[in-house]
Image (spheres, rainbow, N blue to C red):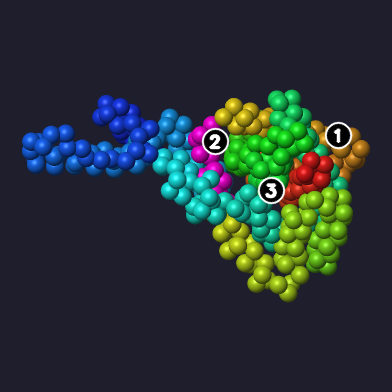
Amino acid sequence: MKKVILIFGILSLLIFIKPVLGFSANSTNTTTSTTVSKTETSVDESFVSEAFDGIKHFYEFTGFANAQSGNLIMILVGIIFIYLGIKFDYEPLLLIPIGIGVIIGNIPFVPGNQTGIYETGSVLNYLYFGVVKGIYPPLIFLGIGAMTDFSSLIANPKLMLLGAAAQIGVFATFLGALYLGFNLPEAGAIGIIGGADGPTAIFLSSKLANGINVLADGTTVKNLIGPIAIAAYSYMALVPVIQPPVMKLLISKKERLIRMKPPRAVSQKEKMIFPIVALLLTTFISPSALPLLGMLFFGNLLKESGRTERLAETARTKLIDIITILLGVTVGASTQADIFITKDSMMIFGLGAISFVIATAGGLLFAKFMNLFLKGDDKINPLIGAAGVSAVPDSARVVHAEGLKADPHNYLLMHAMAPNVAGVIGSAIAAGIILSFLG
């Protein structure tokens, strides 16, 4: 880390000494020419002058000449993301690609050379097409479906209510965004951060807050894909930091000691029927969520059918890995300082933090409410309510870890997976409802 700070300091020094050298970033569009002022100027002086002008011209096209303070701030943010992913194992499959993308997107360059992610014809712009058009999120959901076991949810369907309760964070964030002055489509896209679901957040923002749609009054919605995606993935990675304090605040020690009865065994036939029935029910409720839910349950059917293992293996390994790389790098690269460092971005990050806390609290409190109507062995440990957010499987792991702290022999992981996968379904349904009203 000390070496990283040293390198970062040297880069900053090189950038800030450019005025001393007489170089200006605003002169990048000028062409250099050698003017011979006097015919009696010596050949040596002319050569030195040309060499100096050549060096100056070269410097004007480097990142040192074109860097702004915002670029340095965002590069530091990218380094922090990488550090958190490697040092603390906070969602490294997400934070490391995003961190590299943030650095790539903030390397200073001269506009017009098809370099930046927002420049038509650049390689990054072509890769970013999958984000802007909402192509990557359904493919992510295909992989998630192929690696998800819905057994715990099938065995105890009432736990689906916890996944639904946690979606209160979505609608609370929506109202908060409206209060802060965002228009309806922008507020709808921001609201989905409360579901703690990165792919769903990207999908909805690509439809509602893409910088293209025009409202009835003639104003164009802002492009908020980058801030929304970064906020959603950041808080997903920080689940082990954000959720435990909320659990300690709302759940008593006695409640943490509740032991749930083992879930019943689920037959293979039930596992095969579930994705088909769930697909029909959820998409009839929210047809706008079909791209996400359709791929989710299709992936799960590939896994459970017993006849398409090759396809399921591809979906949950190679395909999702490729899409995760492309999604992470391009979302990170979309955080160019001149576009990302704005008042709107700061408000989105603030709303994201609040919404995640509200979503966690909603799941915990609803679990306590459910226990008022359950008796004996049917009672649930309220801790699993925190897994109602869509951060799979991190929320379930955090719930399990907190349960073990209270009772080393109380294993909550399988129970917590039920509301966790229900949260994935719930956030997609919420996104579809918002899209159907505001799209």
Q: Residues within 10 Å of mark 3 (few under 14, many from 20)?
A: many
Task: Give the mark nearest the N terminus, 3 or 2.
Answer: 3
Mark carried by residue 203: 3
Residue drawn where x is 27% and y is 29% of the image = 22
- Inspect the image, locate mark 3, and give the three-letter code of the amino acid beneath it: Phe
Residue bearing mark 2: 339
Task: Give the mark nearest the N terminus, 1 or 3.
Answer: 3
* Callout in the foreground (2, 1): 2
As drawn, is 337 to the left or to the right of 401? left
Give the image location of residue 302, x and y in percent: 72, 67
Give the image location of residue 254, x and y in percent: 77, 32
> Could you say which is closer to the camera, residue 36 or residue 169?
36
Residue drawn where x is 74% and y is 25% of the image = 179
As drawn, is 232 to the left or to the right of 27? right
Q: Is residue 318 magenta?
A: no
- Inspect the image, locate mark 2, and give the three-letter code of the amino acid beneath it: Ile
Give the quarter of the image for residue 243: top right
* Callout in the foreground (1, 3): 3
SS at mark 3 in the image: helix
Residue bearing mark 1: 369
SS at mark 1 in the image: helix
As drawn, is 423 to the left or to the right of 81? right
SS at mark 2 in the image: helix
Is most of the magenta stretch helix, strand or loop? helix
